[in-house]
Image: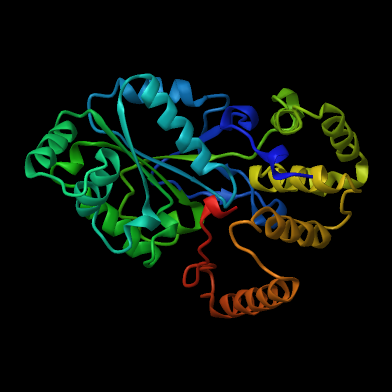
Amino acid sequence: MGEERLKFSLEEVYVPLDLMERQRDTMFEVQAGIDGQGDEIGAQTLGDLDLDRLLDRLVTNSEPNRIGIIGEPGSGKTTCLQKVAAGLLDLQLLPIWISLADLQGKTLEDYLLQDWLKLATRQIAIAPQLQQDFASQFEGGKVWLLLDAVDEMAIDASIALTSIDRQLRGWIGSAHVILTCRSNVWDSGKNALENFSTYRNLSLSDGDRGSPDRVQQFIQGWFRTQPNLGENLSTELAQPQYQRLRDAIKNPLRLALLCRYWLLTQGKLPSTKASLYRQFTDTIYAWKQDRFPTSLAQRQQLNSALGKLALQALSLESPGEPQARVRFRLHEHTV
């Protein structure tokens, strides 16, 4: 099947995610689920608070907003931030998107005044007056900095959070700031951004307890041009033996990979978590073959090396502080 059948706009496959507002100075527990994921206890659940309502709340705030959107890998943090950007544009505000991995050691100020302005204006050199006019937009409270993926900065987690905090000073500090970060990085130790209001992406709802069936909505959007395929997948997923799989695909990335796999193979669903992740791995390789060409031998070597790296990471964990010392970085736009 051609790649042209696998291209979507954000609106075609986007489904709203519920958000949970985390209370400051509160110890959070996690109800164990698949892969240790779950919902936090002791936080205020915002239920069906969607991004439009959240934006309505934020834009009426007279002080610069400081918002953190956190979650597990593949939980939809970047997509959520993209929807925020679209909403801000609709309100004729000025969102500035920065993928923090692109800083490459530069400060936010240097990146904004040089790299970002050059891209935005398509100019080779930026005149001082243009830089001053640009800074005045910040000072007028018109700018919203959307900082994606603190966890993808090429520095230690605690240093990354502290670095962001120190850079949100002066004229840049007048901007509203919304950033995304993986939960394990945000909670890895003393957080210099603890003054941020923090929202956590919840898993996709599946219609349980009267909640909207976001999983089904996503499947319908993915197979919008081939509805029979989507119905067949939903019917297969409803079988009792796939309960753990249904839990796993409440993660948007996993659900996207499953839909991709089903579209390409129209095969039988995996019966174990191991086979599920093996198929997900094969699906990612095939999906990104045009950007990152790999042979079968290279894939096998890469899988072996990643397995050894994972074991090494586990052996380096501090007692009582899992993932505090070792982190993996995988750009979300890669997958």
Q: How many marks?
A: 0
Instruction: Report the front residue among 298 and 329.
Output: 298
Instruction: Report the front residue among 72 and 120.
Output: 120
Res. 278 visible in picture: yes
Residue at 54% over, 74% down: 319
Q: Residue furthest left?
A: 129
Instruction: Report the front residue among 110 and 200.
Output: 110
Q: Please, is residue 329 above or below residue 63 in the view?
A: below
User: Which image quarter is the N terminus in?
Assistant: top right
Q: What x and y, as percent, mark residue 77?
A: 51, 43
Res. 247 visible in picture: no
Give the left or right position of residue 128, taking residue 166 as reference: left
Residue at 81% over, 30% down: 226
Q: What x and y, as percent, mark residue 216?
A: 76, 30
Residue at 35% over, 19% down: 91
Give the left or right position of residue 115, taking residue 252 as reference: left
Q: Please, is residue 330 above or below residue 60 in the view?
A: below
What colour scheme was applied to this rendering of the protein? rainbow
Q: What x and y, as percent, mark residue 144?
A: 30, 34
Instruction: Report the front residue among 244 and 309.
Output: 309
